[in-house]
Image: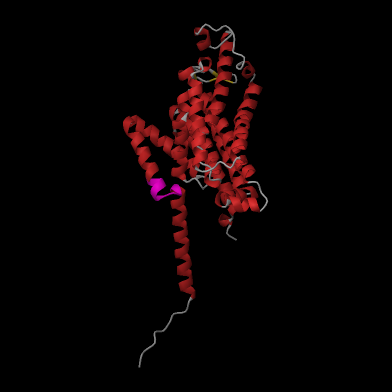
Amino acid sequence: MNILGNPRVKVWGGFALAAVVLFAIAPAVLSDFRLSLLGKFLCFAIVAVGIGLAWGRGGMLTLGQGVFFGIGAYVMAMHLKIADAELKGDAVPDFLAIAGKTELPGYWQPFASPFVTVFAIIVLPAGIAYLLGLGIFKRRVKGAYFAILSQALAAAFAIALVGQQSIGGSNGLNRFRTFFGFNLNDPANKRMLFFIAAGVLLAAVALIRQLMNSRYGELLVAVRDQEERVRFLGYDPANVKLLAYVTAAFLAGIAGALFVPIVGIISPADVGVVPSIAFLIGVAIGGRASLLGPVLGAIGVAWAQSAFSEKLPSGWVYAQGLMFIVVVGFFPAGLAGLAALARRRKRTAQETDSRSAREPARVPEVLS
């Protein structure tokens, strides 16, 4: 019996390999700065996993994931600013004190509690996505209309944040000193944040894999390909889409909450239209219909952006656009699709060779 050919062994082996790379190899070979940078990329990968479910399997072009990413990020940032102010004995965070405020705005006050903060990070993005999705999918909005609507939502969210000086305005929130009591200037605590992000990413991949391989995953693909036929079979496609949309928002909110202490800043520039499109580019390049394609694509594109920005800052935008055009135009299944194509060709060649070996040699007829 070939143990390595067992699908269950392959899955657990893949997770074990990923865990070794993230928890052992990466901390050993990367500097503290590079490890923190990789932690930032892992946050993007968590968002990409959810997009892979909603877009790759559900066919929903989600151009507004920056909204849910931003909700989770701003909730975490508000808690961290309150905690820093309390540590210094101040009534309000530093930027509000400079603006002449002497007490916290009403909507800030619940986030003074770490339990309320964690609950809000989990519930708020998913709850808002549920309400939005309920209105959108029940009205059978789909395709380009859904994409435009979600992108408009991201633009409106970013514009609204710019006008809110009580949460930093266009500058956003930054200069965080602690994370639930841990000093963010301590390299050991920064590594802890990286490990948390890595663990959440592995858990997110496991969750999405379970959904993809379940009966629900098959139903989601059926809704993507033949929505009316699924409706005739007695299922409500709106509910099927809604679960994928809410799951993607849930993961984006958690990713945003982790992004804040790892990077140290959140602003409207991190949650608007451009970041939302950047999430999609990584997913498209990696392969939106696969499980690991969005993860590897998001990390690879973010790493390439960092490398280009260090050496040729003005060239990255053109390189990113060129990659996106090439992938969409010539490799719509992404890099994961190329790997799958190579495996199929190899399997076909092996089957052909095996068939040829089993067939008896034919003696050519001699014409008299």
What range is drawn magenta here?
326-334
Q: Position of residue 348 (x, y in %)?
A: 46, 63
In the picture shown, does residue 126 fall above or below 207? above
Residue sitting farthest toward the bottom = 368
Q: Residue furthest front?
A: 139
Indicate whether residue 330 is drawn in magenta. Answer: yes
x and y, in percent, of residue 138 in the image: 62, 40
Foreground of the two, 54 or 132: 132
Q: What type of secondary structure mainly makes up the magenta span?
A: helix
Judging depth in this view, the residue of 317 and 361 nearest the camera is: 317
Q: Where does the C terminus fall, quadrant-wise?
A: bottom left
Nearest the eye: 29 or 234: 234
Q: Is residue 348 left or right of residue 10?
A: left
Q: Looking at the picture, how far across and down is residue 152, in whole percent?
A: 49, 32
Residue at (46, 37) in percent of width and height = 299
Task: Please tell me which residue is depicted at 52% across the width and 34% down the height of the picture.
Answer: 65
Residue toward you, 92 or 156: 156
Please tell me whether residue 37 is drawn above or below residue 139 in the rendered image: above
